[in-house]
């Protein structure tokens, strides 16, 4: 098996792991990691030959962009306090605690190298957390916090990592210089993210075609990451800012085709890249195994100790941080997503899995310092890092569904239904207001006006059938039954039309492009 064949095996595994995970109630990223471990143990499977400095630029931009599409700037702004406590403060605290313990127990490990180890194992993986949380039906407030933490903690951890590596390689460290680098990295990332977001938004209008616009959304995250890194900024933060800008300002309410096709496209990208990323984590296990070289007992002990520190620090930080956030939340006049019980706090604690970023940073530790000497204790750092990754990702990932079920943490479905109903009412009222505006300037026949009024009401009923109870209680059930019957019959009519048009594709003299264009028209009608 060569590298290309291995890549396609990972792509196939990424697709198959989704239904398998759904069937057995297991997270797909964890299954892909286990697949990577199995492949790494097979003699005929080659070692992965990807330069460590390319892992983050290749995998992280599309994963971050896909994750940001599921959220909004308003959600981040509302949850800024818990996000800062987890994504910034907790990363600092974890880095310091891991560095202190590693420096004390690993003989000869310099403090700068210990800080680098702490920084690379500090950030929970955003993809693993959101993928697992999404499958378990957790409350939206927990998913929001996990998404926000996962998206922003890489920024803090990567900057800390680079500062520590620079100090270990050069042998010098300046707190003022490190602080200035941190600030400048954020400023550059914000500038690049906003500039590329604005430019991409303008270019979207120029391209016009849905295919070209979606292709641009694939290029923009990479461009944002690479440009920010070239200017010594945070590539991760730049991608987040660009994605949030486009999510806020790059959405045209009437551009139905781009929105539907874009949603499908990014679901596919997210599934494939996530699977490959976690498959690589398992495949890279051989690097950690090779570094042990007969010192299994000693190095496993160090790794277990660091795992204990990482897990314990997260719990000890979450308990007071959650209490403080809830106290402050009670004084606010708008909703902020915070854990509402100790059960939800425990689920948040156990969701702190490490993943792609930690692997890439561990493998990117330099081989030599500026003086030409070997990087101090690089083998030990890589082994401990993989111990933390495998322990948190596999152990916590496999047991999290059991823990969630045991604690009875579930999404508030009634709240979601109520919000859906409110949106349905707002949509129907907006349609009615627009109809009145049209009637004010156009002379509509009475029967057409009544028909359009019914259509406006049906817009809301199709979103949430329960909304009819408030406006037309008596006719609600009958109208819903009739609407379902109409939609069923209309679906069968459109299905017959699609089969006929598709059959024409194989007829002599048929133009496939014309057939496909008609099929797209029927497909769009079927979604209405």
Image (cartoon, rainbow, N blue to C red):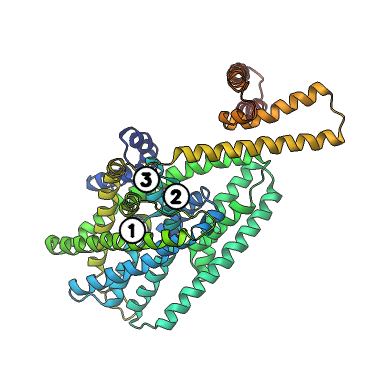
Give 322 or 83, whichever is nearer the viewer. Answer: 322
Q: Does 348 appear above or below 295? A: above
| Quarter holding residue 149 | bottom left
Please indicate, yes or no, whether residue 503 appears anywhere in the rendered image.
no
Q: Residues within 10 Å of mark 3 (few under 14, many from 20)?
A: many
* Residue 322, label in figure: none
Please indicate, yes or no, whether residue 254 appears anywhere in the rendered image.
yes
Which one is in front in this view, the residue at disc 2 or the one at disc 3? Answer: 2
Which one is in front in this view, the residue at disc 2 or the one at disc 1? Answer: 2
* Residue 359, label in figure: 1
Question: Which x, y percent locates residue 229?
Answer: 49, 67
Question: Which x, y percent locates residue 448?
Answer: 79, 23
Per the image, the residue denoted by label 3 is 132
Question: Which x, y percent locates residue 114?
Answer: 28, 72
CA–CA distance between discs 2 and 3?
15 Å
| Quarter holding residue 32 | top left
Question: In this rendering, would 517 be left or right of 300?
Answer: right
Marks 3 and 1, the one that precedes in the sequence: 3
**Label 3–label 1 contact, CB within 8 A:** no
Per the image, the residue denoted by label 2 is 141
CA–CA distance between discs 3 and 1?
19 Å
Marks 2 and 1, the one that precedes in the sequence: 2
User: For the residue labelled by badge 2, is the local secondary structure a helix, a strand or a loop?
Assistant: helix
């Amino acid at each position: 098996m060569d590298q290309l064949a291995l890549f396609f095996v990972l792509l196939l595994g990424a697709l198959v792991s989704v239904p398998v995970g759904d069937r057995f109630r297991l997270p797909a990223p964890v299954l892909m990691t286990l697949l990577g471990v199995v492949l790494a143990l097979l003699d005929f499977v080659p070692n992965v030959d990807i330069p460590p400095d390319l892992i983050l630029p290749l995998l992280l931009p599309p994963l971050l962009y896909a994750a940001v599409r599921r959220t909004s700037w308003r959600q981040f702004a509302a949850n800024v306090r818990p996000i800062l406590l987890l994504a910034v403060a907790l990363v600092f605290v974890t880095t310091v605690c891991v560095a202190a313990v590693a420096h004390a127990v690993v003989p000869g490990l310099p403090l700068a190298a210990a800080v680098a180890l702490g920084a690379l194992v500090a950030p929970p993986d955003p993809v693993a957390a959101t993928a697992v949380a999404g499958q378990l039906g957790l409350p939206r407030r927990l998913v929001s916090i996990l998404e926000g933490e996962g998206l922003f903690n890489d920024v803090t951890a990567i900057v800390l990592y680079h500062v520590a590596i620079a100090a270990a390689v050069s042998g010098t460290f300046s707190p003022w210089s490190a602080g200035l680098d941190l600030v400048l990295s954020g400023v550059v990332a914000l500038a690049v993210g906003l500039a590329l977001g604005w430019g991409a938004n303008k270019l979207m209008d120029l391209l016009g075609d849905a295919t070209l616009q979606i292709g641009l959304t694939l290029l923009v995250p990479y461009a944002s990451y690479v440009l920010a890194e070239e200017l010594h900024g945070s590539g991760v933060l730049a991608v987040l800012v660009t994605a949030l800008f486009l999510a806020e300002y790059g959405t045209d309410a009437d551009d139905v085709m781009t929105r539907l096709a874009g949603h499908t496209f990014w679901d596919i990208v997210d599934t494939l890249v996530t699977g490959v990323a976690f498959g690589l984590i398992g495949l890279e296990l051989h690097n950690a195994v090779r570094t042990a070289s007969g010192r299994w007992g000693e190095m496993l002990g160090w790794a277990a100790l660091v795992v204990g520190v990482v897990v314990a620090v997260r719990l000890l930080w979450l308990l007071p941080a959650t209490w403080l956030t809830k106290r402050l939340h009670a004084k606010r006049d708008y909703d902020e997503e915070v854990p509402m019980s100790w059960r939800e706090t425990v689920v948040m604690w156990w969701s702190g899995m490490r993943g792609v970023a930690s692997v890439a940073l561990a493998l990117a530790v330099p081989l030599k310092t500026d003086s030409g000497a070997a990087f101090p204790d690089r083998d030990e750092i890589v082994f401990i890092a993989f111990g933390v990754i495998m322990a948190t990702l596999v152990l916590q990932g496999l047991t999290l569904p059991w823990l969630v079920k045991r604690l009875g943490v579930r999404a508030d479905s009634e709240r979601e239904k109520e919000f859906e109903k409110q949106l349905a009412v707002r949509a129907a009222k907006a349609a009615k207001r627009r109809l009145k505006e049209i009637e004010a300037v156009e002379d509509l026949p009475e029967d057409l006006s009544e028909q359009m009024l019914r259509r406006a009401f049906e817009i809301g009923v199709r979103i949430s059938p329960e909304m009819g109870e408030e406006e037309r209680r008596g006719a609600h059930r009958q109208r819903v039954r009739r609407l379902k019957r109409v939609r069923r019959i209309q679906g069968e009519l459109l299905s017959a039309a699609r089969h006929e048009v598709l059959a024409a594709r194989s007829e002599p003299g048929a133009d496939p492009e014309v057939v496909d264009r008609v099929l797209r028209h029927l497909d769009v009608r079927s979604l209405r």
